[in-house]
Amino acid sequence: MHEAELISAGAALICFMEPHLYPDAVRKLAASKITGFAMDYVPRLTRAQTMDALSSISTIIGYKAVLVAAYHLGKFFPLLMTAAGTIPPANVMILGAGVAGLQAIATARRLGAKVEAFLLKEREAIAARLPKMDVVITTAQVFGKRAPLLMTEDMVKLMRPGSVIVDLAADQGGNCALSEPNQTVVKHNVTIIGVVNLANTLPMHASQMYSKNITNLFLHLYKSPEGKLDFTDEITKGACLTHQGEIMNEAVKKIVLGA
């Protein structure tokens, strides 16, 4: 990333860094003696919750994934009593119960769907329920690694014709074997949506939440009147990837330098 070469030595940079995807950028920051703080490396601590941009993004994508599914389903989500008879609610399965999964559960229920949620190790139970599902939303992502495979092609074949899968991990290899990043495909009469960067589709609140996270981290890092960083603090130490020409995080050092 050539932008790293434009920053003055000794300056500080706070942003998402994703060193497993952009190792060259981290090397350039270290070489330029830039102090780099990664929003994706803020420790998951109670006192760091207001700085947790990953949770902010997960909240957005969990919410929006349900709306994407509803748009593509071709059926009502809620139970409806109409002059033409009773229309049953859509059956929605959420795989994973992290921040994105919990938000997806809440949103689907608000829309009136019948919602079931499963943990990631319950593959047999998941497969048994798939023939009754209208929508499956997969939310399993592993930081810095390939996403776990939750739905095989055979499992997709179990779903009803016209049903929908929304894969929130498509850009990390996918929770569904048939998903393609940033593409909507139809396989075995099932629409499979490999969503990428759903946070961009809600720009106002995404920006509001992210700016708040960054502001809170900045105020924590530079609370000293002299602007001196406290590397004995767990948040400061965890979020800092580069400082004074060095790569500070040992795990990142292995990724970037292969050490």
Image (cartoon, rainbow, N blue to C red):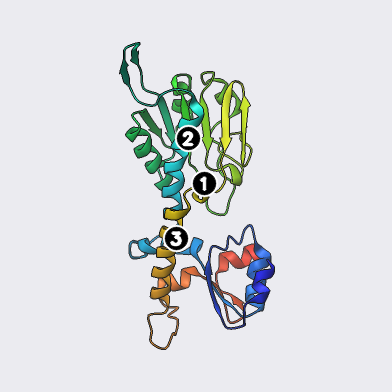
Disc 1 marks a residue whose amino acid type is Leu
The front one of 135 and 152 is 135
Location of residue 251 in the rendering, given as x and y in whole percent from the top left corner: 57, 64
Label annotation for residue 70:
none
**CA–CA distance between discs 1 and 2?**
14 Å
Disc 2 marks a residue whose amino acid type is Ile
Q: Using residue 193 as the reference point, say whether residue 137 is left or right of it.
A: left
Question: Label 3 near label 1: C-beta < 8 Å?
Answer: no
**Residue at position x 38%, y 30% from top?**
116
Location of residue 83 in the rendering, given as x and y in whole percent from the top left corner: 32, 12
Examine the rendered structure and indicate whether residue 108 appears above or below residue 84: below
**Residue at position x 62%, y 81% from top?**
8
Q: Using residue 112 as the reference point, say whether residue 243 is left or right of it.
A: right
Question: Label 2 near label 3: C-beta < 8 Å?
Answer: no
Which residue is the site of mark 1? Answer: 198
Examine the rendered structure and indicate whether residue 203 appears above or below residue 22: above
Label annotation for residue 210:
3
From this viewpoint, is residue 259 visible? no
**Residue at position x 51%, y 24% from top?**
163
The front one of 3 and 153 is 3
